[in-house]
Amino acid sequence: MEAHAAQQFDFLLHTAVERYSERLMQHHQGAAPALRHLRAGSTLPSVKLETFVDALFSEFLLDNPAGACFILQALADHPAPSIGTPPRLSDHLILLAKAAFGRLLRQKTEELLEQSTLFEENA
């Protein structure tokens, strides 16, 4: 991946983690409860990762084959998530990109929330 594209992906990921973690902390009144809900796989609307990723892809104009390829190129070294088999290849690319990005977003959000809980405990 070209350096400029890698930088854009890093910005996208940082923005997504920041927004998602902030949303979780606001809805659950702190980092520790947010982390518990995230790890428990809560189905609360505030935790619904798939809904957040769908909105993020739409907002950043990534919900198309070119956007999906941008994400997949950035995550090329990550293990492939398992997804269903949609009828069109473009739909498959988009679902694969969203699943891969969602998995990374969840991991990075957990890391950020863990750090935030440490700061809350020490405050």
Image (spheres, rainbow, N blue to C red):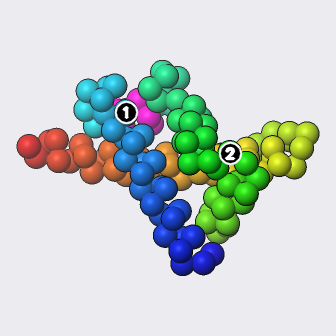
Q: Which residue is mark 1?
A: 24
Residue 81 vs residue 110: left or right?
right
| Residue at the outermost top position | 44
Question: x%, y% of residue 60?
Answer: 56, 48
Three-letter amino acid code of the residue under disc 1: Leu
User: Disc 1 vs disc 2: Cβ atoms closer than 8 Å?
Assistant: no
Give the number of the mark in front: 1 or 2.
2
User: Distance from label 1 to label 2 (Cα)?
Assistant: 23 Å
Residue 113 position by quadrant: top left
Position of residue 37 relative to residue 13, above or below, is above
Residue 85 appears at what percent x and percent y?
A: 86, 41
Asked whether residue 26 appears in the rendered view, the answer is yes
Label 2: few (<14), some or many (≥20) within 10 Å?
many
Residue shown at the point (33%, 38%) measured from the top left: 22
Disc 2 target residue: 63
For label 1, the crowd category at 10 Å Cα-Cα, with few meaning under 14, some 14 to 19 and many 20 or more, is: many
Name the residue at 16% across, 41% down.
120
Q: Which badge, 1 or 2, is on the more N-terminal residue?
A: 1
Tag 2: amino acid? Asp
Number of numbered discs present? 2
- Reply yes or no: does residue 30 show up in magenta: no
> What is the residue that sits farthest to the left in this orientation?
123
- Quadrant into which the C terminus falls: top left
Magenta stretch, main secondary structure, is helix
Which quadrant of the figure has residue 76? bottom right
120 on left or right of 8: left
Q: Position of residue 82 (x, y in %)?
A: 74, 46
Report the span colored magenta.
33-39
